[in-house]
Image (cartoon, helix red, strand yellow):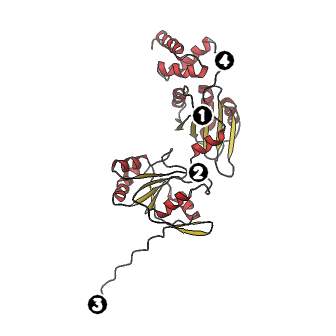
Amino acid sequence: MRRPVAPKAPPEPERAFSLFGAQIVAEPLAPGLYVVATPIGNLGDITIRALLTLASADAILAEDTRVSRRLLDEYAIKRPLIAYHEHNAREAEPKLLAMLASGRSLALISDAGTPLVSDPGHGLVSAALGDGIPVVPVPGASAVIAALSAAGLPSESFLFSGFLPNKGAARRARLNALAALDATLVFYEAPHRLAECLSDLAAELGPRRAVVARELTKTFEEFRRGTLSELADQFAGEPQPKGEIVILVGPPVLTPRAAPDVVDEEIVRALETLSVKDAAAAVAARHALPRRDVYARALSIKRARGR
């Protein structure tokens, strides 16, 4: 009687990628977690190092394996894909950490751009570092940097604040907290909230220069430039736009001194959601007024209103 023969293990996918018709073989990676930036639209915006890393890793952690498969197929990369996203992170992370602890190399990617920038991955990176596992950045495309580089706004100092709150009151409170910063502000926004968001930006931040960047690196890439109020009016009167959107707002601008009653009205409104200190900072920044003077006025108004 013959002994049953154990089935052969399937061959390991080749560690290689294709570029301009040539196949490039990649060496296995050193153990660790590799945070790899991928294109934000145009598949040509990937680095050689990213291709080598993806082709070399023991496995690739993808936010949506269907989206990532299109990128990997474009470059004939055949490494194993593992789903890792915000909905399965708690369950997946212990298994991934065990793989890393055993000496495996894992490449972390998101659907587009640089992982962890308004994308999942912080929990895994933090836990890996806590376990003494090397975490290696493989930089590349980022919608934030792409938009900033072509916006025409000051870029020496900027703050990326991700997505603003969905609700109007919370969004306005967040904007008031950012109003005093002497920096270009950068936000992501969904198409169906763009007009409402621009309206709040205009109301809370005043007559600042701004840019709406849409569909970056794609066929219908668009930059709209103007003041916040101009852009708010434009998008309020148009059909809902499509695609990924980045909003950039220039730093506070010097404006003519507002009348005292106008300043008081703005202080009253700011105090509805902010502390005296933060309300004073926001109004002072908007009108280029001494913060100490506005703080004293805000404190007086708060006491008079009995709050």
Q: Which residue is identified by label 1?
A: 197
Per the model, the C-alpha gap separating discs 1 and 2 is: 23 Å
| Type of amino acid at the residue the image marks with label 3 | Met
Q: Earlier in the sequence, mark 1 or mark 4?
A: 1
Q: From the viewer's side, name the closer residue of 160 and 198.
A: 160
Q: Which mark is residue 1?
A: 3
Q: Which residue is identified by label 4?
A: 256
Residue 6 visible in the current orientation: yes
Q: Earlier in the sequence, mark 2 or mark 4?
A: 2
Number of other residues with Cα within 10 Å of mark 3, as a class: few under 14, some 14 to 19, many 20 or more:
few
Q: Which residue is identified by label 2?
A: 40
User: Where does the image place residue 10, in percent across and percent down from the top left?
Assistant: 42, 74
Location of residue 172 by image quarter: top right
| CB-based contact (under 8 Å), mark 1 and mark 2 | no
Number of other residues with Cα within 10 Å of mark 2, as a class: few under 14, some 14 to 19, many 20 or more:
many
Residue displayed at 52% across by 19% down: 280
Q: Earlier in the sequence, mark 2 or mark 3?
A: 3
Could you tell me which secondary element the residue under label 1 belongs to?
Answer: helix
Per the model, the C-alpha gap separating discs 4 and 3 is: 99 Å
The mark closer to the camera, 1 or 4, is 4
* Vertical relation: 10 (above or below) 34: below
| CB-based contact (under 8 Å), mark 2 and mark 3 | no
| Type of amino acid at the residue the image marks with label 2 | Ile
| CB-based contact (under 8 Å), mark 4 and mark 3 | no
Residue displayed at 63% across by 28% down: 202
Could you tell me which secondary element the residue under label 4 belongs to?
Answer: loop
| Type of amino acid at the residue the image marks with label 4 | Pro
Per the model, the C-alpha gap separating discs 2 and 3 is: 60 Å
